[in-house]
Image: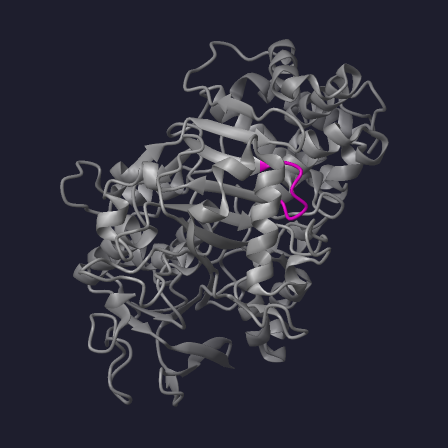
C-alpha cells in the first residue's frame, strides 16, 4: 500500500500523458491488476510485448494484503489485514510455476521459497473433541478402486460420528465420480446438485456437516444445494490425490511466510516493472468501444475522476465477472454471444476477519475448520509461519499474532444475535465469530478469551454493515449447476479482446488463485496467436488425472453413451 501512495512507483501519470507505449501490434492493455491480470502481464512482458496494467484499487486483487492504516508505530509497519487467508494446496501447478520466476532476495527458487508447509488441521465441532488431522506427506504405490474405497472410508470416519452405512454410501459415490468419464462428468454431474448426489437430506447431521458441507461452504463458499456435483467432487478428488502424493507440486497444505504483498505481490511488481510493464493504479474501466469488428479503445476514469480513452492493439479484460458484465454492450454481445451469458454467472460472499492477539496462539500448525459454525468459519493463526517477529515488525509492539478468519456463509442466522452476517454490525460480527469459535473449539473460551483480543479488522470490501445497504465490493464466483455452459473461453470472437479471470473456463473449474493464473496464461496465448508472435506459447498446467483410472473412465464413456450408470454405481444408481 505504501508503494501506491502519491509519488510512489505506482502513482498514476499526469492526466493526458501517454497511457500505452507506442509499437506495432505489440501494445497490450490489461484491464485489471489482480492475479489474472498480473499473470498476463508477466507472460507477455517476458515475450517482448509492451504491457500497461490498469487497476482500480490495488495490485493483487483478492490475494493482496490490506494493511490497517495508522496502526504501526515506533518504526513498525501497519498491522497486516487481508481479504482472506492464503492457502496453497499441493495440487496448484500454475501459481507455483509463476512464483519460481519471481526473484526474492536469498531465495534460490524465488518467491516459491516463501511457501511453508502447514501439516496439521483441526476440524472442531461443538460438544465433541477436536479432530486433529496430520496431513500425509507421502505417496502410494498403486491405485485401484479397492484401495481408493478403503482410503475414502478412512477419510470419512471422523471420530466415528458418521454411521458406517453412510460412510459406505459416500465412499461409493466418490469412487463413482473418480471413475466417471468426461462425458458423464460434463453432461450428467455438471447438472446434478452436490447435495442431491450425496443424498444429503436423507442422512445424519454428522454426514451433512462432515462429508458434505466441509467441501462446500467451509472450503469454497458454495451452497451444496446449488453447487454442481462436478465442481465440488473434483475438489474432493484432487485433494485425495494430493494427500496420496499423486500429481502434486508440494505438500497438501502450504501458506506464505509473511503478508502476501511482502512475500509475493511486491516482488512481482518489482519484476514486472523491470520487464517494462507500466502500472496505472486508480484507473477504472467504464466501457469498451467497438467498431469494425474490433475493440477500438477502452474508456477509463483516472484517480481524479477524469475520463480518458486508452488505445492499444490488444485488450485483456481481467476484472472480476461482476465488473465485466456491465461492460458487455449490445454490440459486443452481438459480436460474441458468449459475452452475454456472463450475466448468468453468480457470486457469493467469502470475506475475512482478522483478530489481532496479545500473545502467540498457535492453536494448531495449520488450518482450522469450525464444522458447526453457522457462518462456515475457517481460520489460521499466522504468526507461527511468518519469518519476521510479529510484535517487532507490525503494529504498536503489543500484538503478537493474528488469527485470520474466513466467513463463508453470510446468510445463516448466528448463535448470539440470531441474525445473518449481512445483517450484523462489524462489532456484532466479531461477537458472533468469537462465540462460534468458542462453541466449536475444545476449551475455546480459554484459548480465545476476550483478554487476548487486541483489536480486529473486517475486510473493507464489506460496506454498510448492519444497514439495509450492506454491500460487498469483492464477492466470489460460485459454480452453480450448469454454470460451465455460461463460462467463456479466454479468447473471444472479437480478435483483439481477451478475457482473464477466475470465471474463464479452466481445468480447476473453481474460483481460485490457480484458476485466475491459468486463465491469465490462456489469455496471454490468445494475444500471442493474434499478434502472430513466434515466441514460445505459455505452458498451461492442467489438473492432475490419475493414469491408473484412465481405463475405467474410457469404459464409462461407453456406458454413458449406452444410457447406463457408472459400473461402480450400485447403491441407488444414477442413470443418465
User: Residue 244 appears at what percent x and percent y?
Assistant: 49, 19
Front residue of 530/568: it is: 568
Q: What residue span does the magenta drawing correspond to?
A: 370-376
* Residue at the limit of the structure toward the front, as seen here: 451
* Residue at the limit of the structure toward the left, as seen here: 106
What sort of colour scheme is used for the picture?
A: one colour
Q: Main secondary structure of the magenta part?
A: loop
User: Residue 54 appears at what percent x and percent y?
Assistant: 36, 71
Residue at screen point 55% across, 32% down: 443
Task: Classify residue 161 by image quadrant.
Answer: top right
> In this rendering, does residue 510 appear at all?
yes
Answer above or below: position of 399 versus 208. below
> In this rendering, does residue 526 appear at all?
no
Residue at screen point 65% across, 73% down: 467
Numbered-mark total:
0
Answer above or below: position of 576 versus 490. above
Front residue of 315/282: it is: 282
Front residue of 494/113: it is: 113
Answer above or below: position of 515 versus 196. below
Amino acid at each position: 500500500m505504501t508503494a501506491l501512495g502519491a509519488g510512489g512507483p505506482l502513482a498514476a501519470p499526469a492526466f493526458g500523458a501517454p497511457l500505452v507505449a507506442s509499437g506495432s501490434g505489440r501494445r497490450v492493455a490489461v484491464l485489471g491488476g489482480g492475479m489474472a491480470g498480473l499473470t498476463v502481464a508477466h507472460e507477455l512482458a517476458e515475450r517482448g510485448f509492451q504491457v500497461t496494467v490498469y487497476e482500480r484499487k490495488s495490485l493483487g486483487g483478492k490475494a493482496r494484503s490490506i494493511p490497517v492504516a495508522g496502526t504501526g508505530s515506533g518504526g513498525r509497519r501497519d498491522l497486516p489485514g487481508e481479504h482472506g487467508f492464503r492457502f496453497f494446496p499441493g495440487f496448484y501447478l500454475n501459481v507455483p510455476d509463476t512464483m519460481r520466476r519471481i526473484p526474492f532476495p536469498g531465495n534460490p527458487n524465488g518467491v516459491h521459497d516463501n511457501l511453508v508447509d502447514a501439516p496439521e488441521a483441526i476440524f472442531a465441532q461443538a460438544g465433541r473433541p477436536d479432530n486433529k488431522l496430520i496431513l500425509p506427506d507421502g505417496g502410494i504405490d498403486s491405485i485401484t478402486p479397492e484401495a481408493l474405497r478403503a482410503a475414502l472410508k478412512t477419510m470419512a470416519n471422523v471420530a466415528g460420528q458418521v454411521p458406517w452405512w453412510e460412510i459406505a454410501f459416500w465412499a461409493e459415490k466418490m469412487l463413482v465420480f473418480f471413475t466417471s468419464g468426461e462425458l458423464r462428468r460434463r453432461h450428467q454431474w455438471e447438472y446434478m446438485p452436490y447435495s442431491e448426489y450425496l443424498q444429503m437430506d436423507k442422512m445424519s447431521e454428522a454426514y451433512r456437516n462432515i462429508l458434505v458441507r466441509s467441501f462446500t461452504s467451509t472450503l469454497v463458499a458454495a451452497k451444496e444445494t446449488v453447487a454442481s456435483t462436478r465442481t465440488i467432487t473434483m475438489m474432493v478428488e484432487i485433494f485425495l490425490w494430493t494427500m496420496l502424493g499423486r500429481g502434486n507440486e508440494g505438500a497438501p497444505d502450504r501458506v506464505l511466510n509473511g503478508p502476501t504483498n511482502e512475500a509475493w505481490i511486491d516482488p512481482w511488481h518489482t519484476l514486472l516493472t523491470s520487464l517494462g510493464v507500466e502500472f496505472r493504479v486508480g484507473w477504472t474501466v467504464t466501457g469498451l468501444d467497438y467498431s469494425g469488428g474490433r475493440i477500438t479503445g477502452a474508456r477509463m476514469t483516472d484517480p481524479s475522476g477524469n475520463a480518458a480513452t486508452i488505445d492499444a492493439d490488444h485488450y485483456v479484460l481481467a476484472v472480476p465477472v461482476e465488473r465485466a458484465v456491465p461492460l458487455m454492450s449490445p454490440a459486443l454481445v452481438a459480436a460474441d454471444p458468449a459475452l452475454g451469458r456472463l450475466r448468468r454467472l453468480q457470486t457469493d460472499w467469502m470475506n475475512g476477519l482478522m483478530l489481532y492477539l496479545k500473545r502467540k496462539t498457535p492453536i494448531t500448525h495449520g488450518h482450522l475448520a469450525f464444522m458447526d459454525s453457522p457462518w462456515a468459519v475457517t481460520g489460521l493463526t499466522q504468526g507461527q509461519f511468518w519469518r519476521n517477529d510479529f510484535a517487532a515488525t507490525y503494529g504498536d509492539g503489543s500484538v503478537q499474532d493474528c488469527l485470520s478468519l474466513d466467513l463463508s456463509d453470510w446468510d445463516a442466522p448466528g448463535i448470539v444475535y440470531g441474525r445473518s452476517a449481512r445483517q450484523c454490525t462489524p462489532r456484532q460480527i466479531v461477537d458472533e465469530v468469537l462465540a462460534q469459535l468458542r462453541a466449536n473449539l475444545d476449551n475455546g473460551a480459554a484459548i480465545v478469551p476476550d483478554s487476548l483480543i487486541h483489536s480486529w479488522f473486517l475486510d473493507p470490501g464489506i460496506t454498510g454493515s448492519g444497514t439495509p445497504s450492506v454491500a460487498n465490493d469483492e464477492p466470489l464466483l460460485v459454480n452453480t449447476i450448469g454454470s460451465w455452459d455460461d463460462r467463456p473461453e479466454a479468447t473471444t470472437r472479437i480478435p483483439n479482446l481477451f478475457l482473464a479471470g477466475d470465471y474463464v473456463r479452466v481445468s480447476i473449474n473453481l474460483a481460485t488463485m490457480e484458476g485466475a493464473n491459468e486463465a491469465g496464461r490462456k489469455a496471454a496465448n490468445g494475444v500471442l496467436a493474434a499478434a502472430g508472435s513466434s515466441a514460445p506459447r505459455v505452458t498451461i498446467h492442467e489438473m492432475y488425472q490419475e493414469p491408473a483410472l484412465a481405463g475405467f473412465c474410457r469404459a464409462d464413456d461407453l456406458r454413458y453413451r449406452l444410457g447406463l450408470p457408472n459400473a461402480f454405481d450400485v447403491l441407488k444408481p444414477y442413470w443418465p
